């Protein structure tokens, strides 16, 4: 009996690892595919449409699981706020930033969210440990190295630095989203909250981007552009989240968080090998510094 339970437990653990690997691969590859799609679409049009489709897919999953999607008026207001931070501001900043910088750099800079989480926790009275503070400082140094692309001189120009800062700002928005969504997620579950927040966030993006929708030339979007858009909507936005939740349920959040460090690795390898991006040794060094700093912050 104990042997059967152990075998069953190992199978569940392995399936959890597989779900998380699938999610990490989808999120990592999402960066270069989104970069390609943004060559044909305005960032607001890209974000609003793909998150609108992603929300519909999540609603279909909930319907298939026979989970009620009904929400109260109070929850509508809460989910609008969640959607504002998690989709409208986060995804809007991410798409505009990615449009101005490389997919490789963006995948590294977006990992700074735990740093902002630690800073917000400190502001709320939960003081980070000495190790966490060291990790915060180390990560910001790594971010500067990645953006500056030099250890001996200041090379930052007005060019991609705007895109880089937008990505870092999007990372901060993601942390705010995490904080404001926590109460309702604990009551209604992550998939329902994500589906509705995606819906409301995409709607707000669409309203704000009406001029961009009017000017969008749909005929210029190539087959590669549509396929890239579809990948980011189906896998990067919808299924990756479902896979991530399934993995976390099976192996726990502590083990699951470790997989987050593989996302920039997948993004960089995909961008360099298949999309022709260039990542200098200095930027790779800075990327390692960022990830080490994030690990120290989480460990502390």
Image (tube, rainbow, N blue to C red):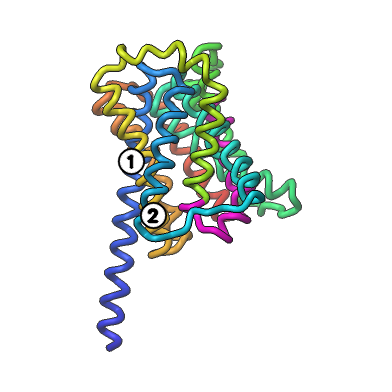
Q: Is residue 26 left or right of residue 200?
A: left
- Which element carries disc 1, helix, strand or loop? helix
Taking depth in this image into account, of 65 and 274 the one nearest to the observer is: 65
- Identified at 51% across, 12% down, the residue is 159
Q: Is residue 239 left or right of residue 75?
A: left
Q: Which disc is residue 261 wearing?
A: none
- Identified at 52% across, 19% down, the residue is 210
Mark 1 to mark 2 CA distance (whole Å): 19 Å
Taking depth in this image into account, of 31 and 210 the one nearest to the observer is: 210
- Is 220 part of what is drawn in magenta? no
Mark whose residue sits in front, 1 or 2: 2
Question: What stretch of residues is rendered in magenta?
Answer: 165-192
Q: Which disc is residue 235 wearing?
A: 1
Residue 94 shows in the view: yes
Q: Which disc is residue 63 wearing?
A: 2
Q: Dominant secondary structure of the magenta stretch?
A: helix
Quadrant the C terminus occupies: bottom right
Quadrant the N terminus occupies: bottom left
- Residue 253 lies, with reference to residue 109, above or below; the image says below
The part of the image, by quadrant, that contains residue 201 is: top right
| 1 or 2: tag closer to the N-terminus | 2
- Identified at 46% across, 29% down, the residue is 48
Dot 2, crowdedness within 10 Å: few (<14), some or many (≥20)?
A: few
- Identified at 57% across, 23% down, the residue is 208
Percent position (x, y) of residue 86? 55, 39
- Which element carries disc 2, helix, strand or loop? helix
- Residue 288 lies, with reference to residue 15, above or below; the image says above
Q: Is residue 82 left or right of residue 96?
A: right
Percent position (x, y) of residue 205? 53, 28
Residue 142 shows in the view: no
Percent position (x, y) of residue 39? 36, 17
Q: Is residue 38 left or right of residue 197?
A: left
């Amino acid at each position: 009996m104990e042997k059967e339970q152990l075998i069953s437990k190992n199978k569940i653990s392995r399936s959890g690892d597989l779900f998380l690997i699938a999610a990490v691969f989808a999120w990592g590859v999402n960066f270069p595919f989104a970069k390609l799609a943004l060559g044909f679409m305005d960032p607001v049009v890209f974000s609003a449409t793909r998150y609108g489709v992603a929300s519909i897919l999540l609603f279909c999953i909930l319907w298939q699981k026979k989970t009620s999607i009904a929400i109260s008026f109070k929850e509508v207001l809460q989910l609008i706020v969640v959607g504002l931070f998690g989709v409208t501001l986060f995804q809007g900043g991410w798409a505009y930033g990615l449009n101005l910088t490389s997919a490789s750099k963006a995948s590294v800079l977006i990992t700074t969210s735990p740093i902002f989480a630690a800073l917000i926790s400190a502001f709320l009275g939960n003081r980070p440990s000495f190790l966490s503070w060291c990790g915060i400082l180390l990560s910001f140094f790594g971010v500067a190295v990645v953006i500056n692309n030099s250890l001996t001189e200041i090379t930052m120009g007005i060019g991609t630095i705007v895109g880089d800062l937008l990505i870092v700002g999007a990372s901060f928005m993601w942390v705010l989203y995490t904080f404001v969504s926590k109460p309702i997620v604990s009551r209604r579950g992550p998939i329902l909250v994500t589906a509705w927040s995606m819906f409301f966030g995409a709607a707000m993006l669409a309203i704000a981007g009406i001029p961009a929708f009017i000017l969008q030339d749909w005929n210029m979007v190539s087959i590669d552009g549509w396929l890239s858009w579809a990948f980011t909507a189906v896998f990067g936005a919808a299924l990756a989240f479902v896979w991530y939740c399934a993995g976390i349920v099976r192996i726990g959040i502590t083990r699951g968080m470790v997989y987050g460090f593989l996302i920039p690795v997948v993004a960089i390898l995909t961008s360099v090998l298949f999309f022709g991006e260039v990542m200098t040794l200095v930027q790779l060094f800075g990327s390692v510094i960022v990830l080490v700093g994030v690990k120290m912050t989480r460990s502390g």
